[in-house]
Image (cartoon, rainbow, N blue to C red):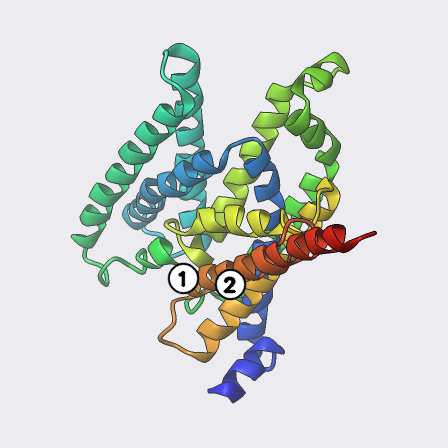
Amino acid sequence: MPHELLAALFFQGGYNTAVVIIGAAALGAAGGAVGVFAMLRGRALVADAISHATLPGVALGFMAAYFLGYSGRSLFVLLGGAALSAAAAVFSINAIRRHTRLKEDAAVASVLGVFFGLGIALLSIVQGLPTAGQAGLDAFLLGSTAGIRLIDAAALAAAAVLTLLSLALVFKELRVAAFDPVYAQAHGLRPERADAILLVLVLIAVVLGLRTVGLVLAVALLVIAPAAARFWSDRLGIIVLVAAGLGASGAWLGASLSAAFSNLPAGATIVLVLFVLFVLSFIAGAARGVVPRYLRRMNGAVAP
């Protein structure tokens, strides 16, 4: 098994496996970078609602394709349905916030529960169709890289790179809106527009991560790496780069472990690796890690 792990880590486990691992790393980088702004704007719970709200879209996408005579197992069909239902969830959350007196957390929790419950109900209908079990839809719950085709992995990686490029284009606007919305509005930058852009990027990152880590764990890509990156710097640009690097590293190592050990689910393994990176950052992070802070206090105590 160590040989298989090393082969996967250094992209020697076969062309398809290498492309899948590279795609997972690209998704990890995109999730980590976008997650920094989701964390700063307090949108982590919204990201969780978006991930759970993709389930009815996945099920409806499969059912629509099945009844129209197409392959319901097409990744693009399933992710398209997931994106539509996730967008509907975002619209519902914003509508509840604007037209009722409920706070955002109550709106998010309500939408999350309703959409996830609807998804479970639709999944039971899919089980009754004359197809093989759930038609592989269970892979969207906890993630799986085993069934990803070469063209799917390449498309996911390309979409992740485009997400990173889009984030770079709106970086200034998101940064100002995250730290000083009043200043942003005074200088012609609309915080509401920045929030809308951020939600779109979060939606894309969540939908892209479904096949890799699953809807249950997709939010981890947008939370753990940014939280770990916060221990390494106080500068936003560096935090974003570190979060992208940690997200890519965690996905790369997790996907490699899953490829080498077939009994390890990809999504859970990636999240566990990210958690290990978080613990290491908590201990050794240059800016806020426990050990560096302790050493700085000690040096200050003994300084003449």
In the image, residue 254 sits, relative to residue 172, either above or below, namely: below
Q: Is residue 21 left or right of residue 71?
A: right
On the image, the x and y values in percent for residue 158 come to: 63, 54
Residue situated furthest left in the rendering: 128
| Closer to the camera in the image, 22 or 299 | 299
- Asked whether residue 76 is in view, the answer is yes
For label 2, the SS is helix
Residue at image point 83% right, 51% down: 304
**Mark 1 or mark 2, whichever is nearer to me:** 2
The amino acid pointed to by label 1 is Ala
- Which residue corresponds to mark 1? 268
On the image, the x and y values in percent for residue 267 come to: 42, 60
The amino acid pointed to by label 2 is Val
Residue at image point 80% right, 53% down: 303
- Which residue corresponds to mark 2? 276
Residue situated furthest front in the rendering: 304
In the image, residue 13 sits, relative to residue 65, either above or below, namely: below
The disc at residue 197 is none
Displayed quadrant of residue 261: bottom left
In the image, residue 275 sits, relative to residue 21, either above or below, namely: above
